[in-house]
Image: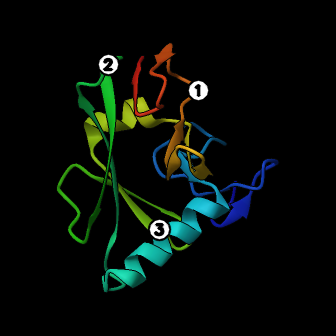
Amino acid sequence: MEHGAHDEHGRLGHQTEAAPGEPLVTLTPKAIEMVKETLAREGFGSDYGLRVGVVGGGCSGFQYSLNFDNQAKEDDQIVEVGGVRLFIDSMSVQYLQGVTIDYVSSLHGAGFKFLNPNASRTCGCGSSFSA
């Protein structure tokens, strides 16, 4: 997939160090819109992006982590998706390969949802998983 191209599901993606033909992480158009809106609302400059990671914990073993950041760390991979920069540390890359981040609204609230094809088990709320 070329930079900024849509796949068959309408997702935008950009390949960095991923397997050939597969983006490292994709964001749905709604997720891109919500990240951009939040960056603007919080007054963050154009040098800010979204730090996406995996940390130990959660009821299924690993937990997803999302924060705004403007500094790449030495071991980060930087992926640009739909004009949003993603900072992904080297440890998290192996767990995030092929993940799609969506933004959903439901009766239970609104927020980012991770769709991870590599997860062998996820929790009911979708914020933790095991590989």
Q: Amino acid at mark 3?
A: Val
Location of residue 44 in the rendering, given as x and y in whole percent from the top left corner: 30, 82
From this view, report whether residue 104 is shown above or below residue 117: below
Location of residue 67 in the rendering, given as x and y in whole percent from the top left corner: 29, 57
Q: Tell me which residue sits at (21%, 49%) in the image.
A: 75
Q: Amino acid at mark 1?
A: Pro
Contact, CB < 8 Å: mark 2 with mark 3? no
Residue, disc 3 = 35
Residue most extreme to the left: 74
Quick one: label 3, few (<14), some, or many (20+) residues within 10 Å? some
Residue most extreme to the top: 120
Q: Tell me which residue sits at (60%, 53%) in the image.
A: 105
106 and 130: which one is in front?
106
> Residue 117, which numbered label?
1
> Residue 51, which numbered label?
none
> Residue 59, which numbered label?
2
3D distance between C-alphas at marks 2 and 3: 26 Å
- Give the mark nearest the N terminus, 1 or 2: 2
Q: Tell me which residue sits at (46%, 31%) in the image.
A: 125
33 and 110: which one is in front?
110
Name the mark nearer the viewer: 2 or 3.
2
Q: Amino acid at mark 2?
A: Cys
Q: Quick one: SS at disc 1?
A: loop
Q: Is residue 108 left or right of residue 13?
A: left
Q: Quick one: SS at disc 2?
A: loop
3D distance between C-alphas at marks 3 and 1: 22 Å
Location of residue 20 in the rendering, given as x and y in whole percent from the top left corner: 61, 40
- Give the mark nearest the N terminus, 3 or 1: 3
Q: Is residue 12 left or right of residue 103?
A: right
From this view, report whether residue 61 is shown above or below residue 75: above
From this view, report whether residue 49 is shown above or below residue 23: below
